[in-house]
Image: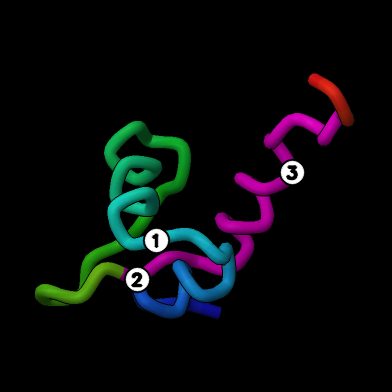
Amino acid sequence: MLLTVPEACQTLKIGRTRLYEILANGEIKARKSGKKTLIEKSELERWVSTLPNYRKGA
């Protein structure tokens, strides 16, 4: 499933600027269709799985 930038932001609960930073760093790969940036849902899931676990007090 492909998501647009606004849909990916909503899915991840992050802002547009933060998503573009992640894309620019190569942490998430995207595809282009004309001017539209599309991101595979599985790519978002892969990225989330690389985030560190939350530790209270850390």
- Residue 48 included in the magenta stretch of the image: yes
Earlier-in-chain disc, 3 versus 2: 2
Residue topped by disc 2:
5
Residue 2 in the image: state x and y as whole percent: 47, 77
Q: Is residue 40 above or below residue 17?
A: below
Residue 28 in the image: state x and y as whole percent: 45, 46
Which residue in the rendered view is the most extreme toward the top? 58
Give yes or no for contact between labels 2 and 1 (Cβ–Cβ under 8 Å).
no
Earlier-in-chain disc, 2 versus 1: 2
Q: Amino acid at mark 3?
A: Ser
Q: Is residue 58 above or below residue 10?
A: above
Determine whether the residue tagged by mark 3 lies in a helix, strand or loop. Answer: helix
The span shown in magenta is 38-55
The count of marks equals 3
Q: Amino acid at mark 2?
A: Val
Q: Nearer the viewer, mark 3 or mark 1?
A: 1
Quarter of the rendering occupied by the N terminus? bottom right
Determine whether the residue tagged by mark 2 lies in a helix, strand or loop. Answer: helix
Determine whether the residue tagged by mark 1 lies in a helix, strand or loop. Answer: loop
Q: Quadrant of residue 4?
A: bottom left
- Label annotation for residue 31: none
